[in-house]
Amino acid sequence: MDLSLAPHAIAMTAKEFQIWSKNFVTETLRASGVKKVVDGITAPIWAWGQRNAIYPLHFGIACCALEMAAASACRWDAERLGLIYRSSPRQCDVLLANGWISQKLRPSLRRLYEQMPEPKWVVAMGECAVSGGPWYDAYNVVQGLDTFIPVDIYIPGCPPRPEAMIDAFLMLNRKITAEQKGTFLD
């Protein structure tokens, strides 16, 4: 490493040196074109891994949770698509919200969304999560998940069938493939 680029490198703290060295490596890779080549090669691999290993946070609130459970049963077998439910938001990349969302539940759901690592997606399942459902005008029911969390996929129905949930995750697979998130050293 060339210390002439940072005349005060000896006097840096460990954290300052870590930031400086990361910026130095990133700028060098960008200037040389290596980053662009590595991104071109690895972006499809990252997208393939992301779309074939989706870990939804199972957050069943109401009757749609039973349809979600049925989609994982042997008849529909959602695991063949790589859908494996996790209990911790820190291990998930999809927030699958189903059922009505009360005003009291909204901060907790927002906190779960913020604890999920990037990249992350949100699926609103059922009329209650999409627009409040039969409790549309109720004072204590949120009028849709997208009022406080960005939603990627909507699954209409009351309750939606397991085939609709599987179709939504196939749509999410196509969306992940098109986005190709995940680049080298970003």
Image: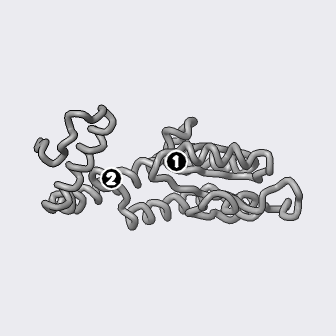
- Residue 12 place in picture, x, y as percent: 27, 35
Q: Residue at x 60, y 51 (%)?
A: 96
Q: Earlier in the sequence, mark 2 or mark 1?
A: 1
Question: At x 21% / y 40%, what residue is drawn?
Answer: 8
For numbered disc 1, what is the local secondary structure? loop
Amino acid type assigned to the residue bearing label 1 in the image: Asp
Circle 2: residue type: Asp
Residue reaching furthest to the bottom = 178
Residue positioned 27% across, 38% down in the render: 17
Return the x and y of residue 80 as percentages of the image width and height. 45, 48
Q: Distance between the Cα atoms at labels 2 and 1?
A: 35 Å
Side of 60 where 87 appears, left or right: left
At 20% from the left and 49% from the top, the residue drawn is: 25
Q: Residue furthest right?
A: 138
Residue 125 coordinates in the image, percent (x, y): 66, 57
Q: Quadrant of the N terminus?
A: top left
How far across and how far down the image is residue 22, in percent? 26, 45
Residue 15 vertical position relative to residue 181 in the rendered view, above or below: above
Other residues around mark 2 within 10 Å, as few (<14) / some (14–19) / many (≥20): few
- Residue bearing mark 2: 186
The reply to whether dot 2 and dot 1 touch (C-beta < 8 Å) is no
Q: Residue 77 bears which disc, if any?
A: 1
Q: Secondary structure at mark 2?
A: loop
